[in-house]
Image (tube, grey):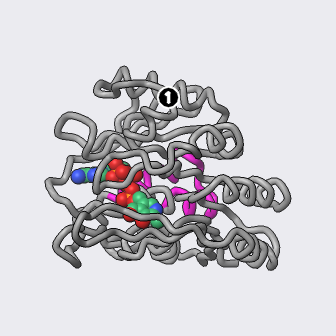
Amino acid sequence: MIKKILTIAGSDAGGGAGIQADLKTFEEYGTFGLSSITSILTVDPGTQLPDIFPIPIDVLEKQVQTAFSGGPVDAVKIGLLGSIEVIDVIEKFLKMNKQPHVVLDPVMAVKVNDNVLQPELVEAMIKRLVPLADIVTPNLVEARILANMEVIETKEQLKEAAKKIYDLGPQSVVIKGGARFPGEMATDLFYDGESFEFIHEEKIETKTNHGAGCSFAAAITAGLGKGLSTFEAVQLAKNYVTSSIQNGLYLNSFTGYVWHGAYLNAEERMTKGEGNNENK
Ligand SMILES: Nc1ncnc2c1ncn2[C@@H]1O[C@H](COP(=O)(O)OP(=O)(O)O)[C@@H](O)[C@H]1O
Ligand SMILES: Cc1ncc(COP(=O)(O)O)c(C=O)c1O
C-alpha cells in the first residue's frame, strides 16, 4: 500500500519551498502527500523581504484532523510554524495520533537574509517539538540558535553543535552546512548519539538552492515513511537535494529554485551504492 506522508508547514507563494516543495518531493519518492498549512510566506519583489501570514488556528486544526481522519500516517514533517498556537496544535495531534516517524525542520531563517524569522517561537519549539522528533534538520543559522553557539565554522564546531542539539531530546540530528559552511564542499553532519557521520557533496556554484532545506527534510520524511533507517534516509535525501540544486531554475529575477523532479528513481540509485559519504 502506498505510504502516506503528512507535511505541517508554511505555504511558499514562490512555489519552491515549504508545502509546495514537500508535496513535490513526496510524489517524487512515490509516496502520497497530505498537507496542513500553518501560514503563508510571501516575498516582496522590491525589498525581497519575507512576510508570514498565519492561517486561523481553527483552520489548521481542521486540516490536521482531516489528515489523520483516514488513520495513521507513515511519517510527518514539520516546517515553518508561524505562531505559538501552531505549536500547541502540532504537539496535541502528534501525541494523540499514531505516526511512526516525525521530522522537524526548525525553519527560522530563509535565504534572502539570515535574520531569525520568529525568535519568540524558539523556546517553545525546543521544549515541546524537538523531543518528539526522530530527526531535527537545522541549517547552519538554525543550528547556531539551537546549540546556543556564536560560531560554527569548523568540523569540530559542527560536532559540538550536533551534540548540543541531540541533548535537547530528538533521536538524531543532521546539521545542513550547505553553502554557508566554509570550504569547497557542501558538508552536512548526522549524529544519533553514537557516531558522527559527515556527508559531503561538492558545493555547487549557483543560487538555485531556494527550497533546498525543505526538500531535504521532506525527502528524509518520505524515506523514513518507506522504511529506510534514519541514516539511509539522510543519505538518499542528500543525493536527491544535490541533484535538485544542480538542475535548479530561475523563475524570477531574485530567486533560484531547486527542481524537485530532477532525481527520478532515487531509491534505485541508493541501492547501487552511489553517493559520496565519508564516515568520521
Ligand atoms: N550550493 C550548494 N551546493 C551543494 N549543496 C548545497 C548547496 N546549498 C545547499 N546545499 C545542500 O542542500 C541541503 C539544504 O541545505 P541548506 O540550503 O543550507 O538548507 P536551508 O534551505 O534550510 O537553508 C543540504 O544538504 C546542503 O548541504
Ligand atoms: C513556507 C516556507 N518554509 C520554509 C522556507 C525555507 O526555505 P528553504 O528550503 O530554502 O530553507 C521557505 C522559504 O521561502 C518558505 O517559504
* Residue 235 visible here: yes
Mark 1 residue type: Ala
SS at mark 1 in the image: helix
Where is residue 162? Give x, y as percent. Answer: 49, 30
Residue pictured at 56% horizontal, 44% vertical? 120
Residue pictured at 47% horizontal, 34% vertical? 145
Q: Nearer the viewer, residue 203 or 138?
A: 138
Residue pictured at 70% horizontal, 57% vertical? 85
Q: How packed is label 1: few (under 14 Cα within 10 Å), some, or many (20 or more)?
A: some
Span colored in magenta:
219-241
Left or right, residue 75 beside residue 189? right
| The N terminus lies in quadrant | bottom right
Q: Is residue 65 magenta?
A: no
The quarter of the displayed image where residue 216 is located: bottom left
Left or right, residue 20 beside residue 178? right
What residue is pinned by disc 1? 147
